[in-house]
Amino acid sequence: MAKSARLSGFPERLPAERVIEKKVIDILEHTFALHGFSALNHRAVEPISQLAKDGEIDKEIFAVSRLHSEGAERSPLGLHFDLTVPLARYIADNANELSFPFKAARVQPVWRGERPQQGRYREFIQADIDVIADAELPGHFEVEIPLAVADAFARLAPLGVPGVKIVVNDRRLLEGFARGIGLENIQAVLRCLDKYDKIGPEEVAKLLATEAGATEEQQRLCLELAAIESYSPDFAEEVRALGVEHPLLDAGLDSLTTMLRAAHDRAPGVIVAQLKIARGLDYYTGAVYETQLIGYEELGSVASGGRYDSLATVGKKTYPGVGMSIGVSRLMAFILDPESGISATRGTPSAVVVAVTDEEGRAEADAVATALRARDIACEVSPSAAKFGKQIRYAERREIPFVWFTGGESGHEVKDIRSGEQTPADPQTWEPPEADLRPRVYKA
């Protein structure tokens, strides 16, 4: 097949890059398991009617059709663009088989038909955790979710991933504040405040006037609220000082201060309240989260989410939930940048190449490889019985550290091709150094 043109937005990793990506995924899955999240894997497609908002086909959805289908599909399908909509469907389908509150973790691809750019792709990997309840969802889960994500990033730090700042807010706080100052178009207020960082306070004030009908005094109060940022639960005093009262405001403040108290004990310096954060999706009803890599804020949010009280429904029954999604592929855009200094020791899993003296001796080489694999040492047999120099160069190109020589007067020997040291070895007992046993990810 002739070399094909690359498809923009559909990344394919080189072997060493995939080693790094797989390590990141392994750490995330391990962390989620430590926090009690059950691993799921959603199907790739959902009915477009479920993916589309209010019956409208979103331009981000990749539609799926059969080339040789007999007639039109009864229910047109599309690739899912996040892992929340599939989770809602999964909960509805399997509610009778699940124990609630149900804690779910998924690490898998999603697809969006948007313009590719740094850290944004058309096919990418997300890592999601969610807690779903079948009645009331206790507020402590809104605290647990970002702390689990903070733990995951702390476990990525030895790879060279920088620290994160998880910015949090509460939709109830925002809605209660807006209603407390006499504004009724809550969605407009949220949209305006969410643009604070992009367009600045002056432009937000203009938008509040035109889109939410805010007076100059209401604009002033909204902007003073949006400017509040704190790692301490004492921020509530700043909010109270604005003189606004509403029951939803009280509920949001209580939830957010509880979160910051817990964060102060379990992840100090990671979670910060930013009262301008609203998140664009309209199904969030409580806590909302966004996450930035410290020193690389221009990359955008690498993890986000929030609480949703009515995303999954079965008849009259509603399943509230809270969750966060880590953009693994967006994170990889930072990790694979040469300036990050993050590398893999090699792209191949093999620690050893077993040399072949001649084709008649290949069976002996295969026996050595079998003995090594039985002890979980990844290896491969040389593809040809070329001169030993060529077989060593083959190992060098594959970045495999050891070459095994069978038989001979001195018996089996293994050569470290980096140092040139060659020593006797027994297939039943020899082991490479721990650092060479499998590919490692490190920061230079």
Image (cartoon, rainbow, N blue to C red):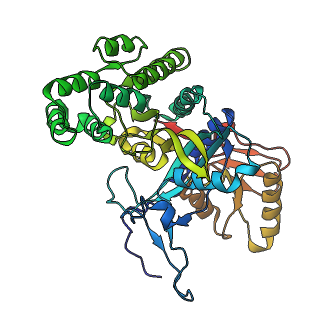
Residue nearest the observer in this picture, 52 or 366: 52
Q: Quadrant of residue 386?
A: bottom right
Q: Residue at x 40, y 47 (%)?
A: 333
Instruction: Tell me, yes or no, if residue 284 can be seen here.
Output: yes
x then y, percent, for residue 132: 62, 41
In what quadrant of the picture does the C terminus appear?
top left
Residue nearest the observer in this picture, 230 or 335: 230
Extreme-right residue of the structure = 428
x then y, percent, for residue 315: 62, 53
Q: Residue at x 32, y 54 (%)?
A: 117
x then y, percent, for residue 45: 55, 65
Residue nearest the observer in this picture, 206 or 30: 206
In the image, 387: left or right of 82?
right
x then y, percent, for residue 60: 38, 62
Q: Quadrant of residue 388?
A: bottom right
In the image, 160: left or right of 319?
left
Count of marks, rendered view? 0
Q: Is residue 289 above or below residue 336?
A: above
Instruction: Tell me, yes or no, if residue 377 can be seen here.
Output: no
Q: Quadrant of residue 247?
A: top left
Residue nearest the observer in this picture, 212 or 265: 212
